[in-house]
Image (cartoon, grey):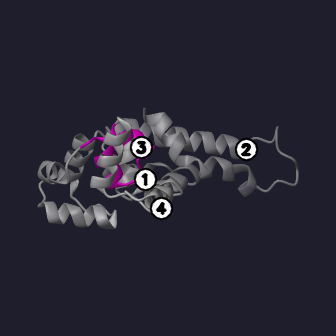
Amino acid sequence: MLPDMVLAWERGQLLPSEQELTALAAALWCAPADLLGAPTTLREYRWSRGLALEDVAFAVGLRPKEYARLEDRNRWTGDARRTAALAEVLGLSQAQLVAVTGRAEKLAEYLRSAASVRWQPYVKPVSAMVALPRERIEHALSQLHEQYQSLMTSTLSWSETASPEDKGAPFLAQILDHFWQLVE
């Protein structure tokens, strides 16, 4: 490893390959996961668990080249069975699974609508995205709706010049966090 390459890694300008990360971790007497920080991509989750690409591919029922393409694109396209297998092999929580499979923004869109309009029509699409019992999702959506409506009707802490959108914007911006807290 060249010093310029290591400096580029430290600055976030380059990412080490799997082999380089393993070699660096061995030189520093630590696990590769210790060098990564919080994983955000399929590849980083795999590396943080110390799993070979072939092992993850086998666990989710894909050929290694197919799974490698998904990692390269950082875009998961597996069906429900393969997605459940991915969560299991990588040890992902529901929140991590939704984020790493690229569904977080769509879920946030559903949750914002459920909170601000009516929550009942969003039970089915949210259930399709999040593998949790329907009752927990219904409870969380109704709670989000109640919290948002309560915030919008509250006038105690808002000036007369604040618009309704201003009142609810911070809550809606953190809607995913609120949802995950409610379903845990």
Which amino acid type is marked by label 2? Thr
Report which residue position mark 1 lands on.
122
Look at mark 3 in the image and give the residue it sits on: 35
Within the magenta stretch, is there residue 125? no
Q: Which element is circle 1 on?
A: helix
**Quarter assignment of residue 33:** top left
Which of discs 4 and 3 lies nearer the camera? The answer is: 4
Q: CA distance from mark 4 to mark 1?
A: 51 Å
Residue stretch in magenta: 31-50
Q: Based on the picture, tell me whether residue 48 belongs to the magenta stretch.
A: yes
Residue at image position (50%, 51%) is 111
Callout 4 amino acid: Asp
Residue 143, compared with residue 47, is above or below; it is above
Disc 2 to disc 3, C-alpha distance = 47 Å
Between 177 and 70, the one lying in front of the other is 70
Residue at the disc numbered 4:
4
Residue 63 position within the rendered picture, expressed as x and y whole percent measured from the top left: 11, 61
Residue 68, x across and y down, in percent: 22, 63
What's the amino acid at mark 1?
A: Tyr
| Rendered image: mark on residue 153 | 2
CA–CA distance between discs 1 and 2?
Answer: 22 Å
